[in-house]
Amino acid sequence: MTVRSIGLVGLTVFLTACTSAAPVKVTTGDQCFRCRRTITDDRTAGEMVQGTFVSKFKAPGCMAKYLVDHPDERGTLFVTDYNSGKLIAPERAYFVPLTVNVATGERDYRAFRDAAAASSAAADLKTNTVLDWKTVLERARS
């Protein structure tokens, strides 16, 4: 391999690393991009990464509502696995609906990487409902 070839490979790796969408930790106290409320539980947060711009959301339902209202927005999406706190792709998550605010009836979701953990949480929350991302988006449309 020539020096020039090595340089091109190195440049390609560097550019790929700089353009890949990496999640940014959402922390309690951050502001939700859609509703502008303070994120009070980072274990239910989500985000959309568009190049170097990161939009943080208080929960998967809030992010889904934003995406429905802005269908031309594109980016890499992440939701927080409720048990581990790690960000995962929403297409790989299982969602459990919950009531966020009893006074207003506001509902949202907890995301889980593991189907068994989601089923257990659904039973604990007495919803017995586990949804996929497509269904969360459909519910945001209605």
Image: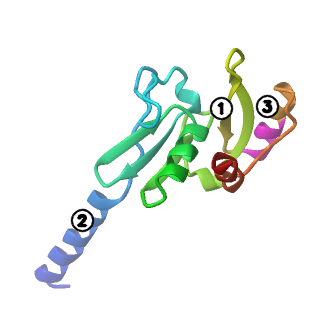
Q: Magenta stretch: dominant SS?
A: helix
Pointer 1: residues within 10 angstroms few (<14), some, or many (20+)?
Answer: some
Earlier sequence position, callout 2 versus callout 1: 2
Lateral position of residue 75 relative to residue 63, left or right: left
Which structural element holds mark 1? Answer: loop
Name the residue carrying label 1.
83
Residue farthest to the top, as pictured: 103
Q: CB under 8 Å between callouts 2 and 1? A: no
Q: CB under 8 Å between callouts 3 and 1? A: no
Relative depth, front residue between 46 and 38: 38
User: Label 1 amino acid?
Assistant: Asn
Q: Is residue 17 visible?
A: yes
Pointer 3: residues within 10 angstroms few (<14), some, or many (20+)?
Answer: many
Separation of marks 3 and 2 at Cα, in angstroms: 41 Å
* Rendered residue at 30%/60% (across/down): 19
Pointer 2: residues within 10 angstroms few (<14), some, or many (20+)?
Answer: few
Relative depth, front residue between 48 and 89: 48
Which segment is the magenta one?
A: 114-119
Q: Is residue 116 magenta?
A: yes
Separation of marks 3 and 1 at Cα, in angstroms: 10 Å
User: Label 3 amino acid?
Assistant: Ala
Relative depth, front residue between 9 and 95: 95
Q: Is residue 87 visible?
A: no
Q: Which mark is residue 121?
A: 3
Name the residue carrying label 2.
15
